Amino acid sequence: MADYKEIYEEAAARVRAAMQYLGHERLLQEHVLLEAEMANPNLWDDPAKAKDTTKRYGQIRQDLETLRTLKENLEDLEIARVFIEEGDDSFREHLDEVSERLFELLEEVELRTLLGGPFDEGDAVCEIHAGVGGTDAQDWAQMMLRMYQRFVESEGMEFELDDVTEGQEAGILSATFIVRGRFAYGYLAAEKGVHRLVRISPFDAQHRRQTSFASLEVIPLLEEGSSEVTLEDKDLRIDTYRSSGAGGQHVNVTDSAVRITHLPTGIVVSCQNERSQLQNKAKAMEILRAKLAERARIEHRESLERIAGPQDDVSWGSQIRSYVLAPYQMVKDHRSEYENGNVQAVLDGDLKGFVLEFLKWRRSHLDR
């Protein structure tokens, strides 16, 4: 028989820790202040500030609702435990259901303790590139695009596909997409790297096993109005071309797609999935700013490493994960050693376990 007292005590301790981590009292105070700001009729005189205010207000309401749900479930757990201890076994099933919900929500909150980076809570720009493996690699890149779209949507975040370069025979050569939502960058940064697929090739007449590779790049998306990057018109070459993406007949008869080249660095970005040239240009500029900011951060980090002298290699190698469909079925992360034998579920976007175990692995290595 399960020790329901121990279950309750563990849950109570974790709820107390969650309330302390999220700062329940601080959230209540900030909520009052932001409510006053939201009621200000002049709030939208400064659109950038108003956007930040409404975003933060939504986050605080979400955190307070999470803490309220934790407390309510813990109270239900305590009531059910007391009835069971008094001999009423009809509450056992209810207690099991409540405890399952409670511990799942606690895991969600505790995951946030692993996301303390300066950009983890923000949006992300992602790029998928087909690597070695020919047509199979291009097909694999398209499979990855679908996988990440499903993962993003299952987490309640927004997925914006901005540019796709089709493969020669099948699949895609590359794709750029933006993910908007709380902790979008923190989650997807865990997926950054080279992904390896092993399967019986559907493009091989002899049905031989093929290994192919595709990579995911992830960078933080800057907040609108950020001063981290300044762009000058003289440094930009802007080309327009006919869109080849989805969108109906409109995209095939107008030069709505935009390609921007940053001349000093040679960085090229493009966007073709919006309905107008102006929208595509705005989105491309947003991606370009993010790329330039990431480049500056990398250069700064490299300069510090040169000053500090030689360092141990802390990279994770060129291959972070393998997806094996033949001769057996298994997805394995080579950093955390986390595995999932349900390959189809993973390809359908079931990545949360991999993200969580990677973040735990990263924390353990940083603490050494």
Image: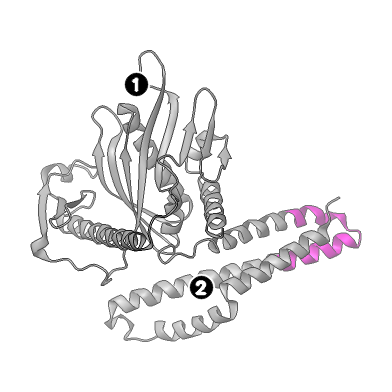
SS at mark 1 in the image: loop
Magenta span of residues:
74-96
Classed neighbour count for the residue bearing mark 1: other residues with Cα under 10 Å, few (<14), some (14–19), many (≥20): some
Give the residue pinned by disc 1.
Answer: 203
Residue 147 found in image quarter: top left
Q: Is residue 101 above or below residue 142?
A: below
**Residue that lies at the very extreme toward the left in this rendered image:** 234
Q: From the viewer's perspective, is residue 72 above or below residue 150?
A: below
Q: How is the image coloured?
A: one colour
Q: Are marks 2 and 1 in contact (CB under 8 Å)?
A: no
Q: Main secondary structure of the magenta part?
A: helix
List x then y, in percent, for residue 227. 26, 72
| Label located before the other in sequence (2 or 1) | 2
Is residue 185 or residue 310 the one in the foreground? 310
**2 vs 1, front mark:** 1
- Quarter of the figure with residue 183: bottom left
**Residue displayed at 57% across by 70% down:** 65
Instruction: Residue 263: give its label.
Output: none
Residue placed most toward the observer, 305 or 62: 305
Identify which residue, 294 or 150, lies in the foreground.
Answer: 294
Q: Amino acid at mark 1?
A: Phe
Residue at image position (65%, 69%) is 17
